[in-house]
Image: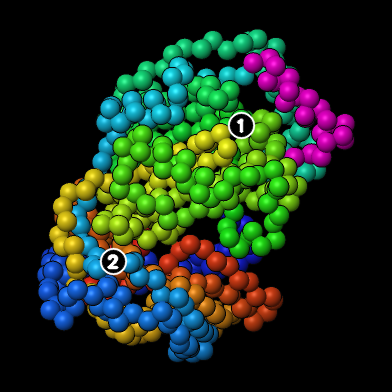
Amino acid sequence: MKKVIAFCLTAAMAFSLIAGCQATPDKPVVVQKDLEQMIEKATEEDETQQDTSLAACINTPKKYTTSFDGYNGDLIVNVNAAVTVPESDGISVARIGKHEFTQGEADRLMEVFLQGETLYQVDLSMTREEIQEKLLTYYGMRDGSIPIDMDGENPQDKEKLQQTIEYYEKLLKEAPETKELCPANTTFHAPDTLINPDAQVIEGTATVNEKASYFYVNNGFFSENNIETVFINAKMHLEGNYSACPYSVLSDGELKDIQIPDSFKMSRTDAQNAAGEVLTKLGITDMTCVSIQYAVMPEEVATGTVVAEPEAVITPQQLETGKWAYCLQYQRSINGIPITLTSHNGTHHEEEGDVSMPWPYEKLEMIVDETGIVYYYYRSPYSALETITEDAALKQFSEIESVFEKMFPIIYGHLDEEGTDYMLKVDITEVELGLIRITEQNSRDTALLIPVWDFFGDVTIIPYEGDPYQFSDNDSLITINAIDGSIIDRNLGY
């Protein structure tokens, strides 16, 4: 759950340099040559590393500790990090491709999530009863019995409140008593609004477990790479925004000051078992659960008065009275080793003026409560094409240390220039070996999964005037290719 902070712009500028520090090569052949060299290096055999664990092969310590400054002292880096290596004898390099949902997969999704209920066309109109309920709330704001809240805007905006009341009073005069339900088309078809002429979608609403539900499968609505499916099964306000997830996800740090209600009895194991059962029914076998966090739907969403955003800030009272659940995130695994989870989407353009369509990273997320799956989101599914090697030759960890200590001050070098009005303190707390998807030159439909080292931690911005601010996020501060030691930009995917 992310909060708006005073230094968010400064922080964004600090991290944006990762994208800027590695310019796109002028000649495509340079990238291609480097990629070929990397694959050649990955497939080299080292007779001294046979029959040993992956951690032993590259002499990985359990802890990595060091400290260093930037060139002008405005950057301080402290490393006291646990080093995480998959329990395996080797790590793969594989080629993957894009995957569009088939009609058979869509049918299976509807079978699993709709549970035999009819899918109806999306109807954004409101009945008289729904409008009257909204008017009662706005009347309460007008007479002072309810605090004015106009979608988070100025609480004293009585003029906007009156305009809203007049809008709904006018709407009420022509509103129907009930909605006429029309069955939705459950085969892939072109959407009513064509953005990509080749797009194919299935969309509709249903009543599942006595709750209003939304179902959507999309092959290329906004662009050829916009592939996703969404299912939401929660009592929520649907006016104008069916696809908004009504839950806010809590980070582990935020739980320190939050009391989990005694009424929430579900365990993480229960949630993972429920999600795993659904994946089995869907025929998805190559995804690994890499994160389980608490999620909360505020009480007012459950009663149908507001839609929460997945990362919106909710109040202590809402945490106490809201509907609790678990948010589970899955990553594709190759021979049991998953792609490392970060919050990067991989959708940045390579260079200014680039008209190629970004290819988002694969993402599979579920929210589970005692009733089952209340939110399912799967974006940019991959298809496994080939395994290039199951045992990539990696650099020794000491070599990765050298790359990190040399490149980190360079990447964040603009913060170390004379004239800056703040310092940046970085505390690296975890170093993790995993996989990442990188772009293949001259191919927009395939990519490679390769091993990388990611460095995670906390960042503190220390202005020369004012109070410091520390923030944590699931963004890798630097990603190093475990095969050749090159720096990889997660925003660009190479």
Mark 2 Cα-neighbour bin, 10 Å: few <14, some 14–19, many ≥20: some
Q: Residue at x 41, y 52 (%)?
A: 289
Q: Nearer the viewer, residue 256 or 247?
A: 256
Q: Point out the image quarter for the C terminus.
A: bottom left
Q: Quadrant of residue 464?
A: bottom right
Q: Quadrant of residue 124?
A: top right
Tell whether 293 sits left or right of 285. right
Q: Point out the image quarter for the N terminus.
A: bottom right
Amino acid on which the number 2 mark rests in the picture: Ser
Q: Which residues are magenta?
A: 127-149
Magenta span main SS: helix
Residue pointed to by mark 2: 88
Residue pointed to by mark 1: 236
379 lies above or below 406: above
Regarding mark 2 in the picture, which secondary structure is present there? Answer: loop
The answer for how far apart the CA atoms under marks 1 and 2 are is: 44 Å
Image spot of residue 381 (x, y percent)? 31, 44
Which numbered tag is attached to residue 297? Answer: none
Q: Nearer the viewer, residue 183 or 369?
A: 369
362 lies above or below 478: above
Q: Residue at x 46, y 19 (%)?
A: 117
Tell whether 35 sits left or right of 111. left
Residue 136 magenta-drawn?
Answer: yes
Regarding mark 1 in the picture, which secondary structure is present there? Answer: loop
